[in-house]
Image: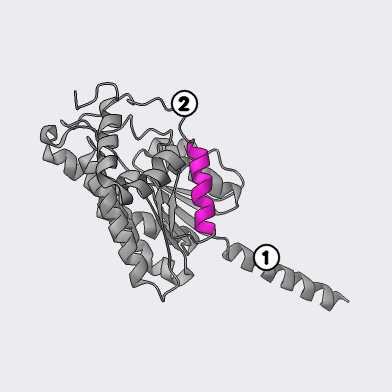
Amino acid sequence: MIFLYFRVEIICWQDYSQVNMQKKVVVITGASSGIGKALAERYAEAGWNIVLGARRHDRLMEFKRQFNSTEVLAVKTDVTCESECKNLIEAAIKKFGRIDVLINNAGISMRALFNNTELEVMKRVMDVNYWGTVYCTKYAMPYLLKTKGSLAGVISVGGYVGLPGRSGYSASKFAVRGFLQTIRTENLKTGLHVLIVAPGFTASEIRKSALKGNGETQGETPRNENNMMSAEECANHIFLAIKNRKRELILTFLEGKFTVFLAKLMPRFVDKLSYKMFAREPDSPFK
């Protein structure tokens, strides 16, 4: 009887250890606010181990203290710096030994006519949105392939339709979409899942931190965010799309799905519509 008791105890411990070892890991960039923060909360709710990457380490550490039911690793990460992206992935592997999902969420916007935009602003936006995605993906790929995991990139409707006054932003999001589509095709037989996410207008800090043509931050959003989709709702949609291994997620009907669809059928009409919509914004660069 004693022998059987110890044998049962050993088997139970082994099963428990295996469950612990198999606990999945998500890496999220731009995780200190907005959609990234909401994604971390959603994955924590589902019991995942979480790796948070963002430039504002103080915010990350403050956010990390909110979690008590899951393991969280916070890594100061400027995604424009290749070495910091590499460090983010290496820290995740050192801590948890695996990566099941990488969500490239870090992003920055801009708002100015191209003629009035300094080239350094264009470069800055591309460095964050496009190269940040490329760097993190490059170093995470071997581990994602090993787990047959998910690679996700958060773009925008501006990655399907050129948004006037946001030339650098749209260009970077188009680039991310092309990059991820190519990665998906290259990995048709490896088991890697690739999701491209295009939120509509979502309540977050991205408009406040948007760059003006001279490189200064915009400060105040030109849009009323009260009726926008919340970051939490957006994060839940993304969580489910990754879980169901969808190829594409375009959020909101009118400003998302319908706009993308209409742009294929009536591109000139959408051009005029976009121009009018953005020209009506407070302090619009078109005025």
| Front one among 163 and 68 | 163
Q: Is residue 185 magenta?
A: no
Task: Please give the name of the residue rendered at 19% of the width and 27% of the height, measured from the top-left corner.
Answer: 286
Question: On the picture, is 45 further left or further right than 34?
Answer: right
- Residue 127 disc label: none
Q: Quadrant of the C terminus?
A: top left
Which residue matches tag 2?
226
Measured in 3D between alpha carbons, the distance from the residue under mark 1 to the one under mark 2, in whole angstroms, is: 46 Å
Residue 279's place in the image compared with 20, above or below, is above
Q: Where does residue 239 sit, x and y in percent of width and height? A: 52, 51
In terms of depth relative to the viewer, which is nearer, 57 or 210? 210
Q: Relative to 80, is 95 above or below?
A: below
The kind of residue tagged 2 is Asn
Q: Is residue 217 left or right of residue 36?
A: left
Q: Which amino acid, mark 1?
A: Tyr
**Magenta part, dominant SS:** helix
Q: Is residue 17 visible?
A: yes
Residue at image coords 38%, 69%: 142
Residue hosting label 1: 16
Specify the quadrant of the image occupied by residue 87: bottom left
Q: Secondary structure at mark 2?
A: loop
Which quarter of the image is occupied by the N terminus?
Answer: bottom right
Front residue of 33/183: it is 183
Image position, residue 166 (x, y; %): 24, 38
Q: Is residue 204 above or below residue 145?
A: above
In the image, the segment drawn in magenta is 230-243
Please report the residue visible at 45 percent of the width from the left and 42 percent of the height from the top. 253
Q: Are marks 1 and 2 in contact (CB under 8 Å)?
A: no
Is residue 78 among the parts visible in the rendering?
Answer: no
Q: Residue at x 29, y 25 (%)?
A: 281
